[in-house]
Structure formats: structure tokens, C-alpha cells
Image: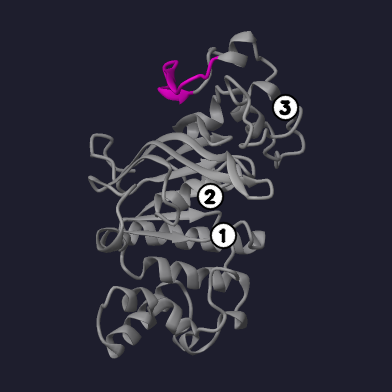
């Protein structure tokens, strides 16, 4: 990880992404789905920030908002000193060369009607880089870099395995030599035996190309393997943020503790107490008052039901926790 005194490559400030919910005969937008509801985080040059949470907590929406596949409802996305939240047209296109994304499903994210060569070369075409000969050469180099043969360029995505298709997606993401890649659960659709190969490839590329990652996942074991710091997300908000070792060794938020307790223990002789949360994740359309976690929290008080906790520095570890109490 880079020097903590270095200015962040990415700074997200109070980011919100609310989707209108249309109801009734005339489909009027009377409510909003608060998918992302006031997120603050930073990513340093060369750092991997893991983003963890249950399905439906807003992780993928946050990632897509950062790369501006969604236009945020409010807040700032400061990337290399520029606010991308409300940029558009040529100004946004220029920044997108430095800001790419790897998608979760390598089947849906690759156009089945295009050859692999056309898919990997598409970023060059969009940005008007090079001629056909140069693009063909660069595609071959990129495919070799991600462990695919040169003749893969003439084939179609359906001719490859899931792990190979994700390598194609990675080649496309690194084509323009970006500074930051948002990785939206890039190995969750792959077999366990293939996951480690793809993760090791991503780590090798990070070292070689000096990449920064925002690594979105729900598998805490995977996130620990690749992340410098980890942010825990619940119902559109960050509830805990710390370096990876601290999160696993001394989690402070009740939700983080429940997630950590659910990680399988490889040693059958070691027993650990499982924290089972009651109820389901509340709807982001009608979130609870006060702390969004209070309906499921075993430590909730009346204060939790009425007052929203903000991220604060807790204890000597320096981790940030959105909880009223030091548990």
C-alpha cells in the first residue's frame, strides 16, 4: 500500500444514489430506493480497498456510480483531484480512460456477437487510439498478459470457460492502462479452483501496472486475501472501515462481528461462536429510523431507534465505526 500521506486517488464524499419508485396507474415516483445513502471513502494510489456486505446492501450500485454508469443523486466523486459526479460528455470520457470496471458475470458483460479481439480492442476504438495494425498488436499483448493464447482474438466468448471469459474482461479493463479498477465481485461466479488463479492474476497486474482496486465482494475470506483496507456496507451506508488485519482481529460493529463469525473455520478442532442475526435486511425503500441496523442488532437501545450514528474513530486501532457505543 502507498504512503498514507499521499493524496487519495479517489475520494467519495457523501455519495447518494436514489432510484425513483414508480407506483399507481400513472407510474408516479412517490418514493425512492436509497441504494447508496451517504457514503464516504477513499482509495490511495496502489491500494486495494475491499467493500463487503450482504446482497442488496448497495455495493454494486456504489461501484457503478463511481465509474459513472449511474449519475449520482448527490455527493462528490473526486478522482485525481476532479469531481466526476456531475461531469458529462468529453470531460467524463477523458477521465474514463483512467477509471475502469470488471463486472461480476463474464457471460453477460461480454458481447457474444463480437470476437474476443473486437471486445478487447473496443476501448481503443472508442478513444480513437491507433490504427488497425496497432490495435491488433496491442490485443495480442493484452491477451498474453492475462494468460490467453494469441489465437483467442479470433474466437467468440462462448468458446471459453468462465475463468477464461473473466480473463477477457480483465484484458479489456486494463487496455487503457487505468489508475483505478472497480472490481464488482469478479470471482464470485467462478469455481473455487479458478478463483485463486484469477485473484493471483489481478494481484500480479496490480504490482506490474501500479493499479488501485475497489474490490467488491461478499466473501470475506477472498477480500482478506487481496485487500489493504476493508469497508463494511449495510443498507447503503458504510458501518465500519479499517485495515484488513484489524477488521478480522477486532471488529467493533455488531454487523461486522456477525459477518466475521460466519466465515467457515478450516480447522475442525477449533470452535468459534456463530452470531446469527435475526430478521432480514430492511428495504432501502422504507429504511428504519435511526441506525439502519437497529432492528437486527442485539445491542440496540432506544437511542439507536431515533438517532443515526455517524462514522467515528473508535479505540486505539484507528478504525472507523458507525455505532453509538464502544462494544
Residue 127 position, x and y percent, is 29, 73
Q: Secondary structure at mark 3?
A: loop
Whole-Å distance between the Cαs marked 3 and 2?
26 Å
Q: Residue at x 63, y 33 (%)?
A: 260
Tag 1 or tag 2, which sits nearer the N-term? 2
In magenta, the rendered stretch is 307-321
Q: Secondary structure at mark 1?
A: loop
Task: Say which of 299 and 286 sits in front.
Answer: 286
Mark 1 or mark 3: which is in front?
Answer: 1
Contact, mark 2 vs mark 1 (Cβ under 8 Å): yes
Q: Secondary structure at mark 2?
A: helix
Q: Where is mark 2, residue-wise?
A: 60
Residue 102 position, x and y percent, is 48, 61
Whole-Å distance between the Cαs marked 2 and 1?
9 Å
Can you say which quadrant of the picture contains the N terminus? top left
Whole-Å distance between the Cαs marked 1 and 3?
28 Å
Residue found farthest to the front: 26
Q: Is residue 220 left or right of residue 230?
A: right
125, above or below 240, in the image: below
Task: Say which of 191 and 122 sits in front.
Answer: 122
Residue 5 position, x and y percent, is 23, 34
Q: Is residue 79 left or right of residue 142?
A: left
- The numbered disc on residue 104 is 1
Tag 2 or tag 3, which sits nearer the N-term? 2
Amino acid at each position: 500500500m502507498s504512503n498514507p500521506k499521499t493524496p487519495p486517488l479517489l475520494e467519495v464524499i457523501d455519495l447518494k444514489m436514489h432510484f425513483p419508485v414508480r407506483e399507481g396507474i400513472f407510474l408516479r415516483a412517490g418514493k425512492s430506493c436509497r441504494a447508496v445513502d451517504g457514503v464516504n471513502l477513499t482509495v490511495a494510489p496502489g491500494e486495494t480497498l475491499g467493500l463487503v456486505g450482504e446482497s442488496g446492501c448497495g455495493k454494486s450500485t456504489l461501484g457503478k456510480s463511481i465509474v459513472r454508469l449511474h449519475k449520482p443523486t448527490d455527493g462528490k466523486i473526486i478522482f485525481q483531484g476532479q469531481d466526476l459526479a456531475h461531469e458529462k460528455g468529453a470531460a467524463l470520457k477523458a477521465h474514463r480512460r483512467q477509471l475502469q470496471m470488471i463486472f461480476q458475470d463474464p457471460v453477460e458483460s461480454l458481447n457474444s456477437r463480437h470476437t474476443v479481439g473486437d471486445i478487447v480492442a473496443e476501448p481503443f476504438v472508442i478513444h480513437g487510439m491507433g490504427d488497425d495494425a496497432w490495435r491488433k498488436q496491442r490485443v495480442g499483448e493484452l491477451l498474453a498478459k492475462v494468460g490467453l493464447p494469441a489465437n483467442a482474438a479470433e474466437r467468440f466468448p462462448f468458446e471459453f470457460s468462465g475463468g477464461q471469459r473473466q480473463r477477457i474482461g480483465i484484458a479489456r479493463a486494463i487496455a487503457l492502462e487505468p489508475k483505478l479498477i472497480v472490481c464488482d465481485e469478479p470471482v464470485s461466479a467462478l469455481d473455487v479452483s479458478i478463483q485463486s488463479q484469477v485473484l493471483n492474476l489481478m494481484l500480479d497486474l496490480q504490482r506490474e501496472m501500479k493499479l488501485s482496486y475497489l474490490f467488491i465482494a461478499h466473501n470475506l475470506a477472498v477480500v482478506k486475501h487481496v485487500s489493504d483496507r476493508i469497508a463494511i456496507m449495510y443498507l447503503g451506508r458504510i458501518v465500519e472501515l479499517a485495515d484488513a488485519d484489524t477488521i478480522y482481529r477486532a471488529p467493533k460493529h455488531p454487523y461486522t462481528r456477525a459477518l466475521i463469525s460466519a466465515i467457515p473455520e478450516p480447522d475442525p478442532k477449533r470452535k468459534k461462536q456463530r452470531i446469527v442475526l435475526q430478521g432480514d435486511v430492511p428495504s432501502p425503500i422504507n429504511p428504519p429510523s435511526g441506525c439502519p441496523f437497529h432492528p437486527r442488532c442485539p445491542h440496540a437501545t432506544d437511542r439507536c431507534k431515533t438517532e443515526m450514528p455517524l462514522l467515528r474513530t473508535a479505540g486505539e486501532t484507528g478504525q472507523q465505526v458507525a455505532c453509538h457505543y464502544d462494544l
